[in-house]
Image (cartoon, helix red, strand yellow):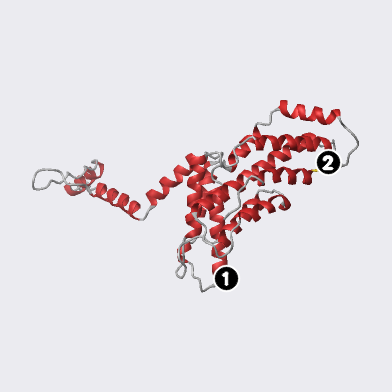
Amino acid sequence: MAALPAPLPSLKMAAVEKRRPAVAPAASFTDNGRPSVSRAAAAAENEEDFLRQVGVTEMLRAALLKVLEARPEEPIAFLAHYFENMGLRSPASGGAGEPPGQLLLQQQRLGRALWHLRLAHHSQRTAFNNNVSVAYECLSAGGRRKRPGLDGRTYSELLKRICRDGEAPEEVVAPLLRKIQCRDHEAVPRGVFRAGMLTCFVLLDFVARAGALFRLLEAPGLAVADRHVGQAVLDTLEGALGAGDHTAAPACYLEAGSRLGPDSLALALDRAAAGRRPSSPMPREEFLEKAAALFIAKVKPVG
């Protein structure tokens, strides 16, 4: 049998080349001897420039600041809602000549403004004021045929939505809305807008605390309390509110109400029990209306 021919030299060299590790290309140098920027570095720099130019970098920074302000229990869900609201159509892109589309756009703007207002509790003054400014800008941006500015109709609608979503009885918040609403055609300045938003949120907290207080007074299994006892608590609450400065911000009255300690209430209840006589029951709705009326009496009307 004839012997097999020896492998060709070219095949041996090819096998060696396959096993040889790849060598990185040498860095190129400019005429002055300095190494030039690699393509990868240049591409990374171009990508960063692109992100800055389209506003992604600033948008992510703003989102992270909102997370730090609100400190939500579920940051991922918070960011998802944040970017969902950011993705809404810009108010400036709407057309005044399309009533159905304009109505939908108006609802989107109200929803987005309300979402921003809820990002931080009103007790977080700096964060709340920042969110109020964002909500105001969202609602006051003008369309193609509309000048920038916030009208009384949009402002009043936002007040109604805050109170409705706060689950406060309509008959409780109606007197407040009549006091701080604006006429549809009126221009609403930023200061009036902020005062209205703050007043609504404070009232909702005030009513919630009054409801918790009433639950301590009501008879077991019934949504009513003894009228003398309920009125004694209301009188104590009125005294706490009256102790504050009548020119102070609405939040100060909430703080005054929070100073109702067990000692003050205990004395009021003892006095009511000492002179107890048969009386008609006080339902929860009546108690809340009277408690809210004490707060609303301290609120200055718009205009």
Give the amino acid at mark 2.
Val
Expressed as whole percent of the image width and height from the top left, the position of residue 178 reads: 65, 56
CA gap, disc 2 to disc 1? 47 Å
| Residue in the foreground of this view, choosing between 288 and 11 | 288
**Residue 142 shows in this picture:** yes
Expressed as whole percent of the image width and height from the top left, the position of residue 244 reads: 61, 36
| Residue in the foreground of this view, choosing between 156 and 95 | 156
Expressed as whole percent of the image width and height from the top left, the position of residue 9 reads: 17, 47
The total of numbered circles placed on residues is 2
Task: Specify which label sits upstream in the sequence, 2 or 1.
Answer: 1
Q: Residue furthest left?
A: 32
Please tell me whether residue 259 is drawn above or below residue 32 in the rendered image.
above
Give the amino acid at mark 1.
Pro
User: Quick one: SS at disc 1?
Assistant: helix
Please tell me whether residue 267 is drawn above or below residue 301 in the rendered image.
above
| Residue in the foreground of this view, choosing between 129 and 9 | 129
Q: Residue furthest right?
A: 278
Residue topped by disc 1: 100
